């Protein structure tokens, strides 16, 4: 079944029926005020921090699903019938329905008995609040009188207290109304408030949720809407709602726009002035126009025209858009990650910077600095941090011997190196940044050296990296208290990090440092090759009792994906080992929906392996298709020159390719989900946890930098394609250090890889130079 389609021109995904298999969501806001909007207007919002500054409440994991949200009710004053343009929560069958998810905005439109209503939700680029532009049109031949109601269910700002300390929060909350503005704040907070406002004449309002809905009712049939008026309730305690009732009379064919603004104000006394420009439809539309320009500009640094329409669609729009969302919210705020307790991940955010580096490197640098501040003086890092306070920790999983993850700190090296290549800002390496003790300062390069040191100082019996609480695979919890479990993956990541440090040192002309990094790399590489090769592939880890994971001798978990891809990415596997381990991935792990994380999956809980064995076979890390790991295999195949295989792996996880079988995929076809149930699961092929996943950044990297081969070098732009042999030509527009490169690649000999000739502005060159910012250049690349 198909629920919608891609409108390529408008850069929107258009949903044409509301009953999608899961809520299909979009994000509004750019990392400060923001939230989630589903295709039926469900979702929540918050100011800067979803845990401590929650504005709208959401009932997670709830039936009926996806409630509440940002609702508009339309009521016929004569018949009393009422409905929502987004179908929920009344679920009145509409004559027509359409939801358009665009970049940073969502428009939901419904029509019922000749009245059309559409609502556009977005956060302006320059303000910390959201705007709802509501348009109502009378398509009938008679004059219609109606009422428009809003519904915004406020949360006590501390979203944990909101659920856990009801005794307190229900006694202290205060709802007020003054001159078109409803405010919601705890009694003891004098200045700040959550609010909803309108510039329209308000006929009646409610600030008290129970007054609006009535007892033993729900959002589906609020008493206020049923009766055609709110009761002007002032909430002195209990739960809050931002409910306005606005009377509207429309002549035949007439339409009217009404604007609502919802948000959080530091000082509620100056709100009226602050909102003035935005409550007027003209001001609201101007803000929407600015937002559209922002996204146009954001995506201008990378534009591809390949023979593959889905690849073009994803690289030019949806993949870039998802990357910005993961950059904003890491793995913190979605329909599945509740914005509570978890915080932003250090490893996650470090990887997320790779997906935005080509377009907002300065913002990426800002985040990298925050991450460096999460490092301990010994080189390891927090596992998580909270954006509002910058405070962090190691999460709440039980600690046995170690409270650190073995990989978090190493990703920082990859992020900093990518930033330097993109910008040429070598001075960054000498900038001073505090450690998480907030006293000790070190340069960025010292931070990175400390990261390598930490791993080198924490080796296990096989002289490879200790596993700590886990590595990239959060669920591989091998530490039972003995403190000797080891991670082959982290050891391979360390090799990659050491080689990236070597590249930086070489480029800076620091030969001695480079030689030292090579030594670190070689030592670890040799240790891995001496003890972790299993015959056809690399082992994955050793548990605390010294038993190998990822070996043919094991009953379960014979082979894992990451120690094959990273053997190549880390430069560990040479000669036949590299080809063999990648072939083993294809033979044992590949499926038509993507490559599974390991095989065979564990069937029973095993405390020596930990969290991975809590999942049923085929789910998540236990044999599921964990999409984040798939682009690593693509890159490894490309490093081996195998463009056809890499492209096959790219296509098999392309969500747009499953648009017509959305009932099976279940999650949004316009973004990569975190995981798809694997071949050992009875529901093989169902996608789970949409949106927030390292899959976004790494697929953008794999496709644009490795398949299309356009990537930043320290002193040049590199074009090194590794494409399907059948492709004859493709184009890429890339803005690099301010200059525009119009690249055309030709493949007359139908090869996968290899560059015969590069011509820049009509002259043959060996290397594509860095040009002056603002200039435009043509680049022709002939493969062969
Ligand atoms: O690598 C992790 C990530 O940090 C959070 N989600 C799960 C991934 C794999 O375990």
Image (spheres, helix red, strand yellow):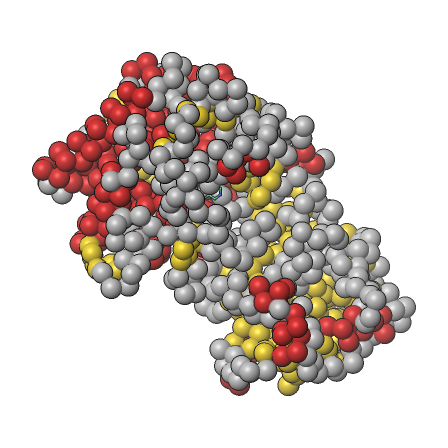
Residue name at image x 28 percent, y 35 percent: 459
| In the depicted structure, whether residue 781 falls above or below residue 91 | above
| In the depicted structure, whether residue 85 falls above or below residue 169 | above
Residue 752 in the image: x percent, y percent? 37, 20
Residue name at image x 41 percent, y 40 percent: 481
Residue 595 can be seen, yes or no? no
Q: Residue furthest right?
A: 79
Residue 156's quadrant in the figure?
Answer: bottom right
Residue name at image x 20 percent, y 56 percent: 442
| In the depicted structure, whether residue 131 falls above or below residue 173 | above
Residue 271's quadrant in the figure?
Answer: bottom right
Residue 374 in the image: x percent, y percent? 33, 55
Counting every numbered tag in the picture gives 0
Classify residue 112 as left or right of residue 487.
Answer: right
Residue 129 in the image: x percent, y percent? 53, 69
Residue name at image x 82 percent, y 53 percent: 93
Nearer-the-camera pick, 687 or 346? 346
Residue 231 can be seen, yes or no? yes
Give the position of the N terminus as an image quadrant: top right
Nearer-the-camera pick, 270 or 784? 270
Residue 685 in the image: x percent, y percent? 62, 30
Nearer-the-camera pick, 307 or 360? 360
Classify residue 581 as left or right of residue 37.
Answer: left
Give the position of the C terminus as an image quadrant: top left
Nearer-the-camera pick, 141 or 376? 376
Classify residue 497 as left or right of residue 313.
Answer: left
């Amino acid at each position: 079944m198909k629920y919608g389609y891609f409108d390529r021109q408008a850069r929107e995904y258009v949903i044409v029926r509301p009953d999608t298999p899961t809520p299909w969501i979009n994000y509004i806001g750019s990392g400060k005020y923001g939230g989630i909007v589903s295709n039926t207007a469900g979702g929540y919002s918050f100011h800067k921090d979803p845990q401590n500054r929650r504005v709208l409440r959401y009932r997670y994991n709830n039936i009926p699903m996806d409630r509440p949200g940002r609702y508009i009710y339309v009521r016929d004053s004569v018949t009393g019938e009422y409905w929502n343009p987004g179908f929920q929560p009344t679920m009145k069958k509409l004559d027509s329905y359409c939801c358009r998810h665009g970049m940073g905005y969502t428009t939901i439109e419904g029509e019922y008995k000749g009245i059309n209503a559409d609502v556009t939700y977005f956060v302006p680029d320059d303000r910390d609040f959201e705007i709802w532009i509501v348009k109502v049109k009378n398509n009938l031949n008679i004059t219609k009188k109606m009422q428009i109601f809003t519904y915004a269910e406020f949360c006590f700002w501390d979203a944990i207290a909101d659920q856990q300390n009801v005794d307190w929060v229900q006694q202290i909350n205060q709802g007020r109304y003054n001159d078109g503005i409803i405010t919601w704040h705890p009694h003891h907070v004098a200045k700040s408030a959550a609010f909803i406002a309108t510039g329209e004449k308000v006929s009646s309002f409610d600030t008290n949720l129970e007054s609006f809905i009535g007892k033993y009712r729900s959002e589906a049939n609020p008493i206020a809407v049923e009766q055609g008026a709110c009761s002007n309730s002032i909430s002195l305690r209990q739960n809050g709602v931002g409910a306005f009732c606005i009377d509207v009379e429309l002549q035949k064919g007439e339409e009217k726009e009404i604007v609502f603004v919802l948000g959080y104000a530091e000082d509620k006394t100056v709100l009226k002035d602050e909102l003035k420009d935005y409550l007027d439809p003209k001001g609201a539309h101007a803000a929407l126009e600015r937002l559209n320009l922002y996204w146009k500009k954001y995506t201008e640094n990378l534009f591809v025209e390949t023979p593959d329409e889905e690849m073009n669609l994803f690289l030019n729009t949806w993949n870039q858009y998802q990357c910005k969302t993961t950059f904003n919210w890491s793995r913190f705020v979605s329909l599945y990650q509740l914005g509570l307790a978890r915080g932003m991940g250090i490893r996650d955010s470090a990887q997320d910077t790779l997906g935005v580096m080509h377009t907002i490197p300065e913002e990426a640098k800002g985040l990298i600095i925050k991450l460096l501040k999460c490092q301990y003086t010994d080189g390891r890092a927090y596992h998580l941090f909270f954006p509002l306070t910058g405070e962090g920790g190691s999460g709440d999983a039980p600690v046995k011997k170690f409270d650190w993850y073995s990989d978090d700190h190493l990703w920082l090296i990859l992020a900093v190196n990518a930033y330097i290549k993109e910008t040429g800002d070598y001075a960054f390496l000498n900038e001073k940044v505090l450690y998480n003790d907030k006293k000790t300062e070190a340069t960025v390069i010292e931070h990175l050296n400390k990261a390598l040191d930490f791993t080198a100082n924490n080796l296990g019996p096989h002289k490879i990296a200790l596993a700590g609480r886990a590595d990239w695979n959060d669920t591989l919890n091998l530490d039972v208290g003995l403190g000797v479990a080891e991670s082959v993956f982290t050891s391979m990541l360390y090799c990659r990090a050491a080689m990236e440090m070597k590249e930086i040192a070489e480029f800076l002309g620091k030969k001695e440092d480079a030689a030292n990094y090579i030594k670190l790399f070689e030592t670890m590489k040799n240790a891995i090759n001496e003890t972790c090769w299993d015959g056809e592939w690399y082992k994955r880890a050793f548990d605390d009792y010294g038993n190998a994971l990822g070996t043919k001798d094991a009953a379960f978990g014979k082979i894992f994906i990451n120690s094959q891809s990273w053997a190549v990415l880390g430069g560990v596997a040479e000669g036949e080992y590299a080809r063999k381990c990648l072939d083993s991935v294809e033979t044992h792990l590949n499926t038509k929906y993507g490559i599974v994380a390991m095989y065979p999956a564990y069937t029973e809980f095993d405390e020596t392996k930990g969290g991975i064995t809590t999942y049923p076979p085929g789910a998540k890390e236990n044999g599921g298709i964990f999409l984040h790991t798939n682009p690593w295999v693509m890159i490894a195949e490309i490093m081996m020159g195998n463009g056809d295989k890499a492209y096959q792996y790219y296509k098999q996880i392309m969500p747009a390719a499953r648009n017509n079988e959305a009932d099976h995929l279940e999650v949004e076809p316009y973004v990569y989900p975190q995981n798809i149930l694997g071949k050992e699961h009875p529901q093989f092929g169902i996608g789970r946890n949409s949106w927030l996943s390292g899959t976004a950044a790494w697929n953008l990297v794999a496709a644009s930098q490795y398949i299309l081969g356009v990537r930043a070098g320290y002193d040049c732009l590199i074009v090194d394609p590794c494409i399907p042999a059948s492709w004859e030509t493709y184009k890429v527009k890339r803005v690099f250090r301010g200059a525009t490169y119009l690249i055309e690649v030709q493949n007359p000999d139908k090869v996968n890889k290899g560059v015969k000739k590069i011509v820049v502005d009509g002259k043959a060159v060996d290397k594509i130079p860095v040009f002056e910012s603002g200039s435009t250049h043509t680049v022709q690349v002939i493969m062969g």
